[in-house]
Amino acid sequence: QVQLVESGGGSVQPGGSLRLSCTASGGRIYSIWDMGWYRQAPGKQLELVAVITGAGTTNYADSVKGRFTTSRDNAKSTTILQMNNLKPEDTALYYCNVHGPLENYWGQGTQVTVSS
């Protein structure tokens, strides 16, 4: 069974940066699968933040375009979310997601708090 482990969350002041990492273990992650990041703020719905396809195409929520960048290392079964110029509205629990044709895996979440 594949497990996703996120790291890199924390507290930062507005304008600061954080780098989230998600690594899969316990099973095989195919390079053609999509790897993405979602977040959920208190009282709000889960929303897609960024996704990178197996072909390397990226897609971002409008609210993070130009500030966040996602990448992947297939050899290490890892995806990265680099978050720059963080804003208080970016405060949320961030989840890593990996899915294939029949598979859908989620990490346990890592908290990001942006506050002065």
Image (cartoon, rainbow, N blue to C red):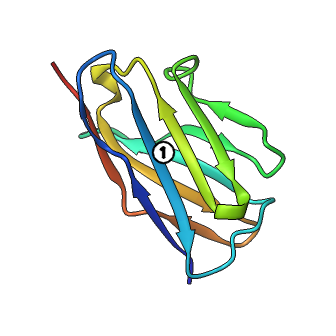
Q: Is residue 51 above or below residue 27?
A: above
Q: Where, quadrant-wise, is the N terminus in this rendering?
A: bottom right
- Name the side, left or right, on which 75 lies relative to 37: right
> In the figure, residue 16 lies in which quadrant?
top left
Considering every residue shown, the one lying at the far left of the view is 116
Percent of width and height locating residue 44: 32, 38
The disc labelled 1 sits on which kind of residue? Tyr
Closer to the camera, 61 or 11? 11
- The image quarter containing residue 41 is top left
Q: Which residue is mark 1?
A: 38
Which picture quadrant has residue 74?
Answer: bottom right
The local secondary structure at tag 1 comes to: strand
Question: On the picture, is 57 further left or further right than 110?
Answer: right
Q: Residue at x 49, y 20 (%)?
A: 63
**Residue at the image point whose x is 48% and y is 50% from the top:** 21
Q: Is residue 53 above or below residue 19?
A: below
Disc 1 crowd rating (10 Å Cα; few below 14, some 14-19, many 20+) is some
Q: Position of residue 60 (x, y in %)?
A: 61, 30
Residue in front for this viewpoint, 48 or 82: 82
Instruction: Give residue 30's position: percent from left, percent from top.
Output: 76, 67
